[in-house]
Image (cartoon, grey):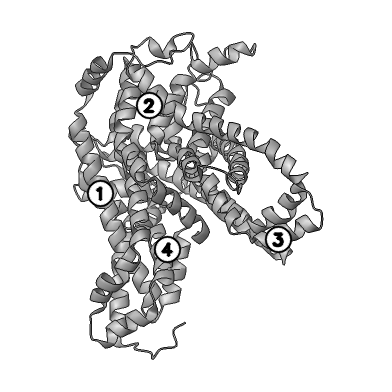
Amino acid sequence: MKINFSWLKQPSLYLMLVLVALLSLFPFYWMYVVGSGTNATIASIPPTVMPGSHWTETFNHILGTFDILTVFRNSFIVSITVAVLQVFTSTLAGFAFAKLRFRGNNALFGLVMVFLMIPVQLGIIPLYLLMANLGLVDTLAALILPYVVSVFGVFWMRQAMVSNVPQELIDAGAVDGASFFRIYRSVALPMVRSSAFVLALFTFLTTWNDFAWPLIITQTPENFTAQVAVSQLNAANNPSYPAILGGSLVMAMPLIALFLITARQFVAGVMDGAVKG
Amino acid sequence: MSTKVHISTKHESRAGYAFLSPFFILFGIFGLAPIIFTVYVSFFNWDLLGTQEWVGLQNYIELFQDSRFYQSLGNTISIFLLSSVPQLIAALLLAIVLNSKKLKLRTFWRAVILFPFITSTVAVAVVFGAMFADNGGMMNWALGFLGVAPIHWHADALAGQIVIALMVNWRWTGYNTLIFLAALQSIPGELYEAAEMDGASKISQFFNITIPQIRPTIFFTVVTSTIGGLQIFAEPMQFGGGNYSGGSSGQFRTMTLFLFDQAFAQLRLGYSSAIAIGLFLIIAIIAGINFFISKKLVKADI
């Protein structure tokens, strides 16, 4: 009876997964279809499902609205800097919380757990005023500074240090007279490489896709990030749908590439985080 | 934990504080201080051009009398429920499917369902806005086959909120599926084997083993989708044509959209700070209720 049951279940199971996969991928394909079509493609009845041949026009339209290379460069600079700095500050704090003995360690970590619950995004108005006072409005620095540290990152790296770095190695290093920074860098850090990589990946992704803050803090096209640029296409008075959808696809290309390369680590990272969280 | 000799020296303490200081100092400046300063700004008539006039509770009084506040609060909660409830149920069911022992191409399916997660909310909103166009959109065309009259997705309140919820669902269901999958995999197999021997049905196993075992994960996903869902911004903004209005009559204007409109379109920083504090309190209350319920449930379990 049991064998019969699962035999019947399998095909419908795959059918369901195929359906879910199509739903997941279709919007990307459709961005491509509309992007390669004309302004009429989007509203054609029945819907167009085959790609057109107008990529050049679409590309020219996008280039007329903003400079793709500048926008990419900005998003890359900001996302990579944020990822690197966040991994550095998070591994450093995570190392201290997990492996060093000092008064107040537990109390301070309790504070971090409280911070985890605070929606800091709601402080956006004073943050704007702060950047205005520092003269940083409309600079890439303003896009980086608020994200140099991450509460989640500290939490995540502390867990990784606890489960991957034996205390004996830290103590042995200390007995040998190595500085604690040296122990952090040469002993602890290499042992949490994979967790740190996952944190970097996620930070890069969220920074690349961040929208609200870059939207208000950047003003001139030279400082636009990919998301702000796409929203500019959407807000234009005379919308070109191929440019909007094609532009969205072009702006997502670096992330799509990154995802395809690191899919395995990415999936593992999400699932790992779930158990730890 | 360690049974080794304690080498707790002044040196070690100093290193501990030094390594924590970048995090605490920077989080203080860019995370905590702005939140606290928001309270201060909310007592002022404050615009970006230089006016700073103390008005006491005036902003809050105005907020409680502002119909847009109640409308945006209702919209936010409506979109939040339309997105998080179906999304978490779908994610759990999908996770059970993906957890099947005989499933082929495991990593492939996992990667495919996670794919929407890497898309920016801006791109998602743009694509969905086009698919759900009021005139000549793909969805209305498809619904036509089922005999449904064209729906005014952008003009109608509930329809618009459903589309915005769909955007959120599309982006987040796969992510939550993997979170649930990880939880399912940590349930000891013996529990199911024992239930199987007792002749328990699959449905009964689901409610008596699976759900209680993954309760902490359910709590985690509910909390994260609450905090995220109540701050929804990019989707309604792009769906409304790239401005802060949230539709022709504010029918899908969310709290965060309202906050941005007052701050960066009307330049009323004091008033928008009052909105931020209001939203902060609502999030805190809902998170508190979540926490209370889950604590009760965990206790009842023991």
The residue sitting at 51% across, 45% down in the picture is B106
Do the residues bearing badges 1 and 3 touch, measured as CB atoms within 8 Å?
A: no
Q: Are marks 3 and 2 on the same chain?
A: yes
Q: Are marks 4 and 1 on the same chain?
A: yes
Tell me how far mark 4 sits from mark 1, CA to CA.
21 Å
Q: Which residue is mark 1?
A: A80
Marked residue nearer the N-terminal end (4 or 1): 1
Looking at the rendered structure, the number of numbered marks drawn on it comes to 4
Extreme right residue here? B199
Q: Which residue is mark 4?
A: A155
Nearest-to-viewer mark from 1 and 3: 3
Q: Disc 1 sits on a residue from what chain?
A: A
- Confirm whether residue B102 shows in the render: yes
Residue A108 vertical placement versus A215 (above, below): below
Tell me how far mark 1 sits from mark 2, CA to CA.
27 Å
- Return the mark for residue A27: none
Q: Which residue is mark 2?
A: B242
Instruction: Please provide percent x and percent y for residue A239.
Output: 33, 16
